[in-house]
Amino acid sequence: DGGITQSPKYLFRKEGQNVTLSCEQNLNHDAMYWYRQDPGQGLRLIYYSQIVNDFQKGDIAEGYSVSREKKESFPLTVTSAQKNPTAFYLCASSIPAANYGYTFGSGTRLTVV
Amino acid sequence: AQKVTQAQTEISVVEKEDVTLDCVYETRDTTYYLFWYKQPPSGELVFLIRRNSFDEQNEISGRYSWNFQKSTSSFNFTITASQVVDSAVYFCALSEAPAGNTPLVFGKGTRLSVIA
């Protein structure tokens, strides 16, 4: 079945460490997105990519980095510069004019210990 | 700038009650798209509906219905005869272009608890 796979489901990071969250899709979607979810804050856009080898910053890109070397993959790195990384991270993908909007992964919960 | 406001942070209802989730949006465009998503405890957002700005017809899908009113910039969601399985966080979202490559802007969500 087609879909988006995020891994791992739970991730623990020590302060000062970089960590990479994986997002893979087999839907042949051109666009991919990373959102951060905090309690009471809704979903906030971190980065998005409309095509391979291109990506744009979202509203809260500071302390994060991404790459889009393959259509299927859009990994997110949470760097040590991100001061408050503990959150739930959601990856999504879409094609133009899709009536079903975005397809979301099941998320990665990152905790700094 | 785009903005989506879901004023209700949390709602609790008893099973079989009807419940309406409010969504108010702001946009300068005349062409835009509105969405509702459901986030169950598992975390994955599930698409419920997409509506474009030129279609103001209300829509009904089983126990779910949506009321789109451009005059008040609202896109409210009603669940009739609520069930425990409806317990989730519901998000309203807005896109100022066909929802392909343009990022959606989400409201902060409404947590619905349906009590048996």
Image (cartoon, coloured by chain):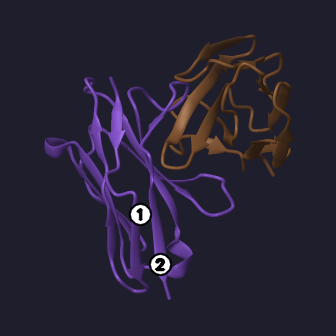
Chain colours: A brown, B purple
Splitting the image into 4 quarters, where does residue B67 fall? bottom left
Is residue B71 found left or right of B5 in the rendered image?
left
Quadrant (top left/top right/bottom left/bottom right) for the C terminus of chain A: top right
Is residue A27 found left or right of A92 in the rendered image?
right
Instruction: Identify the residue at image location x=25%, y=27%.
Output: B30
Q: Amino acid at mark 1?
A: Glu
- Tag shown at residue B114: 2
Is residue A44 found left or right of B6 in the rendered image?
right
Q: Marks 1 and 2, how far apart in space?
A: 11 Å
Instruction: Identify the residue at image location x=31%, y=52%.
Output: B7
SS of the residue at dot 1?
A: strand
Eyeballing the image, is A90 above or below B78? above
Q: Amino acid at mark 2?
A: Val
Chain of the residue where label 1 is placed in the rendered structure: B
Eyeballing the image, is B24 above or below B97? below
SS of the residue at dot 2?
A: strand
Chain of the residue where label 2 is placed in the rendered structure: B
Q: Compare residues B57 and B29 and report the one nearer the observer.
A: B29
Q: Residue furthest top?
A: A53
Splitting the image into 4 quarters, where does residue B16 fall? bottom left
Q: Position of residue B31 (x, y in %)?
A: 31, 28
Looking at the image, tell me whether mark 1 or mark 2 is earlier in sequence order.
1
- Tag shown at residue B10: 1
- Tag shown at residue B93: none
Eyeballing the image, is A20 above or below B55? above
At label 1, counting other C-alpha atoms closer than 10 Å, the crowd grade (few under 14, some 14-19, many 20 or more) is few
Instruction: Identify the residue at image location x=83%, y=34%.
Output: A22
